[in-house]
Image: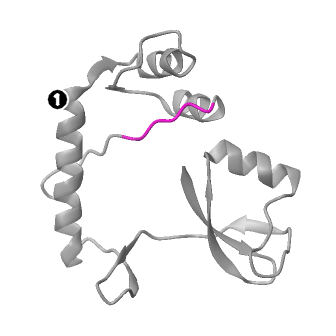
Amino acid sequence: MIQYSLQCSNGHRYEAWFKSAAAYDEQQARGIVTCAQCGDAHVEKAPMAPNVARTDQERVPLSANHPEAARIRAMLRQYRQKVMSEAENVGDRFAEEARKIHFEEAEARGIYGEATKDEVLGLIEDGVDFLPLPDVGEDN
C-alpha cells in the first residue's frame, strides 16, 4: 500500500491510499482518481512531508531535530536488524527472487538484498509487494 497527498485543480488537498504506485498510475490514466471534496477529475500528486501524530492529535512535520526522530530512527534500526537476522540475503538477485516468490515459482520466505532503480520499477509494475530496508546510521 502507498499513500499519496493529492490536490485537485480547485485547490482541495486530501490523502488517498493505493495498492501500489502502478495502481495509482493506472487509475489516474482511466480518470477514476477524483477529488474527495468536489469530484474534480483533474487531480495531481501534491508535495508531502512525513508526519508524526502528537498526543494532542495535532499533526506536525517531522524534522531531524524533532524529539520523536531519535525514537523513530531507533525503531528503523531495530526493524533492519530483525530483517537481517531472520531473512535470507539474496544480494543482487533480489528482484529475481522476489518475482519468483510473488509468482509462486519459489518457496515463500523472507528475503532482502539489492536492486537497481530499473529493477525496483519492474517489481512495482509486476505488482510485487516489497519494502525498502532502511539504512539508518547513528547520525542520520
Q: Secondary structure at mark 1?
A: helix
| 128, above or below 37, in the image | above
How is the rendered protein coloured?
A: one colour
Q: Which residue is mark 1?
A: 85
Q: Quadrant of residue 11?
A: bottom right
Where, quadrant-wise, is the C terminus in this rendering? bottom left
Query: Is 8 inside the magenta-drawn segment?
Result: no
Residue at image position (24%, 34%) is 83
| 95, above or below 27, in the image | above
Residue at image position (20%, 55%) is 75
Residue at image position (41%, 16%) is 93
Residue 94, x across and y down, in percent: 41, 21
Q: Amino acid at mark 1?
A: Ser
Q: Does the image show residue 140?
A: no
Residue placed farthest to the top in the image?
A: 105
Q: Quadrant of residue 82?
A: top left
Residue 107, x across and y down, in percent: 42, 12
Name the one closer to the observer, 75 or 65: 75
Residue 61, x across and y down, in percent: 39, 78
Q: Does the image show residue 124?
A: yes
Classify residue 110 as left or right of residue 118: left
Question: What segment carries the magenta color?
Answer: 127-132
Q: Main secondary structure of the magenta part?
A: loop
